[in-house]
Amino acid sequence: MQKGYEANIYLKDFFALKPLAAKCRTRIRVCRKCGLPFFLHRHRKRKVFAVCIPACGVFIFFLSCFIWNISIEGNLSISRPVMMEYLMEQDIGYGTPKRTVDCKQLAADLRSDFPNLIWVSVKLSGTELSISVKENTDALSETDKIADAETGSAAGQRMSAAQNSSATSDLVAEEDGVIVKMITREGTPLVQEGDSITAGDVLVSGELAITDDSGSIVSYRYCTADADIYIKTTLQYHDSFPLVHDTAEYTGKKRYGFYIKLFGRYFGVNLGLDAFETADIIGKERQLCLLKDFYLPAAAGILQANEYRITARAYEKEEAEAIAGANLQKFLAENEEKGVQIFENNVRIDVSATACQADGTVTVVKKTGRAAHTEKTDLRQEGTDE
């Protein structure tokens, strides 16, 4: 067995070993040389390789001057496609020069054009544009605002009237019901708790009578009627759907495809994805990133197609009743979100041979009262009639 030792040593220390090796009468043999100087020395005749290294560095530096990835965080009601479309309108997207992007101005524009955003942060790091936002979750969504406008929300009417101090209005009933609670802040109440009302009845008048010591009306003062009026009313509910429905059944057959994306262009290999008549396609993509935030305009992805067939099947009675019940609970939950209190539920679910139907009424306690024009009284005309 040959005796000896193996060790890793730096080049400068190798020359310091020679006097010691001579005193110990030992021989030093170099098994392998590692490091950049030795690597360059071995490839000193490969001129193309030597040119490509600096060229690659220059190319990477050139790519670092553009945006190749956009991250958006904190958006809930504003979807990413909407955000991306807005950025494209501002001439900001993949491949945009970083020097043309003003982060402070972009943040200000986002806050201005999206009132629901209460905080916006925009920063450039590497080749990534990072946008972090915080939304006002207490604000009404556009759908809720439209619904309130269509139903003539009393709160919305009072807010509009408050903005115009010279406006005068009555509060009138929006639907039939029985008053269960009433708090008047401004105006003359014409009904009280326990009264039955119909749609269009004046509940609180914006006309205030001013009387003298004898109780005679000497003049009128007009205001914007303001009150919280809650009524018990009945909502009609109807829901129906056929028992026979189309459903997707997966066959278990799968096909795969691969692609490479360079500068926004796709180059792929389709391994029979079009062979399926109906299929779900799921894709996964990974973008090339040299460092934490140094993204490059290159990505690779894989596509998976899962074949399925559309078949007709009928719901069982228990399934149909469960779906109808879920739809009813969704209807009740949507009303509760609007501040409606569910008092009684009288909905019946019937399952026939071909369909499932839910019909009935839901008794609720809700707020009512919309603003209407106040008819002013002429005292002189009133005295003439008497």
Image: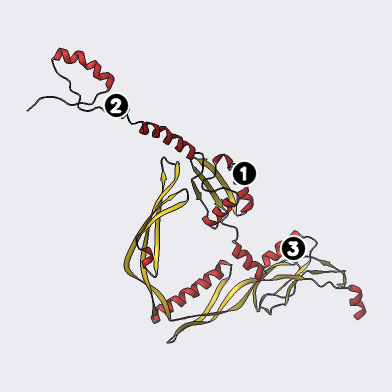
From the image, tell me which residue sits under label 3. Answer: 161
Type of the residue with mark 2: Phe
Q: In this view, does 327 lie to the left or right of 215?
A: left
Q: Nearer the viewer, mark 1 or mark 2?
A: 2
- Residue pushed farthest bottom? 353
Earlier sequence position, callout 2 versus callout 3: 2
The CA span between labels 1 and 3 is 36 Å
Badges 1 and 2: C-beta atoms under 8 Å apart?
Answer: no
Earlier sequence position, callout 1 versus callout 3: 1
Earlier sequence position, callout 1 versus callout 2: 2
| Numbered tag placed on residue 38 in the rendering | 2
Q: Is residue 386 left or right of residue 326?
A: right
217 or 18: nearer the viewer: 18
| Numbered tag placed on residue 105 in the rendering | 1
Mark 2 Cα shell of 10 Å, populated few (<14), some (14-19), many (≥20): few
Picture quarter with the C terminus: bottom right
Mark 1 Cα shell of 10 Å, populated few (<14), some (14-19), many (≥20): few
- Residue 370 place in picture, x, y as percent: 70, 70
Residue shown at 63%/52% (left/top)?
Answer: 113
Type of the residue with mark 3: Ala
Q: Is residue 274 left or right of residue 108?
A: left
Judged from the image, the secondary structure of the residue bearing numbered disc 3 is helix
Picture quarter with the N terminus: top left
- Residue 270 place in picture, x, y as percent: 37, 59
Mark 3 Cα shell of 10 Å, populated few (<14), some (14-19), many (≥20): some
- Residue 224 place in picture, x, y as percent: 76, 65
Q: How many labels does the image show?
A: 3
Residue shown at 57%/51% (left/top)?
Answer: 88
Type of the residue with mark 1: Gln
Badges 1 and 3: C-beta atoms under 8 Å apart?
Answer: no
